[in-house]
Amino acid sequence: MKKVFIFGKPTCPVCKDARKKIEYFKEKEKFDAKIEYYDMETIDGLTEGAFHEVSDIPTVIVLDDKNELVRWVKQPPISKEFLPYLV
């Protein structure tokens, strides 16, 4: 099963945009990937971010069975980049 990890901070408007965009596409396109948001201002978020080598926010990662398929850093992906990995 595919997963989408979103790493960001609550005070980051670009991070909020990335999260909203991914959730919108999930609803619109009905893909079944699980979306997980990690707050990089928490211990859990920092730990998961370190594991996935996240160095900047927002970072969006699409994984398939723990293998990274694609990653976007500092900007949310646009739909034509993102959707081929999920639908």
Image (tube, rainbow, N blue to C red):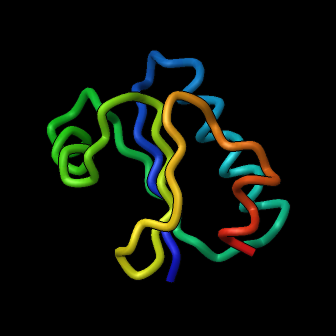
Residue shown at 76%/43% (left/top)? 78
16 over 60 or under it: above or below: above
**Image label count:** 0
Q: At 67% from the left edge and 43% from the top edge, which residue is drawn? A: 77
Quarter of the view holding residue 16: top right
Answer left or right for 78 relative to 45: right
Left or right for 55, reference 35 = left
Q: Tell whether 64 sits left or right of 43.
A: right
Residue at image point 63% right, 37% down = 76
| Corner quadrant of residue 8 | top left
Quarter holding the C terminus? bottom right
- Residue 45 location (% of width, % of height): 26, 42
In the image, residue 62 above or below residue 12: below
- Taking the image as shown, residue 58 lies to the left or right of residue 24, namely left
Question: With respect to residue 9, does 27 lie above or below?
Answer: below
Picture residue at 49% right of the left edge, 36% below the top? 73
Residue sitting nearer the eye, 55 or 15: 55
Q: Is residue 32 above or below residue 25?
A: below
| Closer to us: 78 or 13 | 78
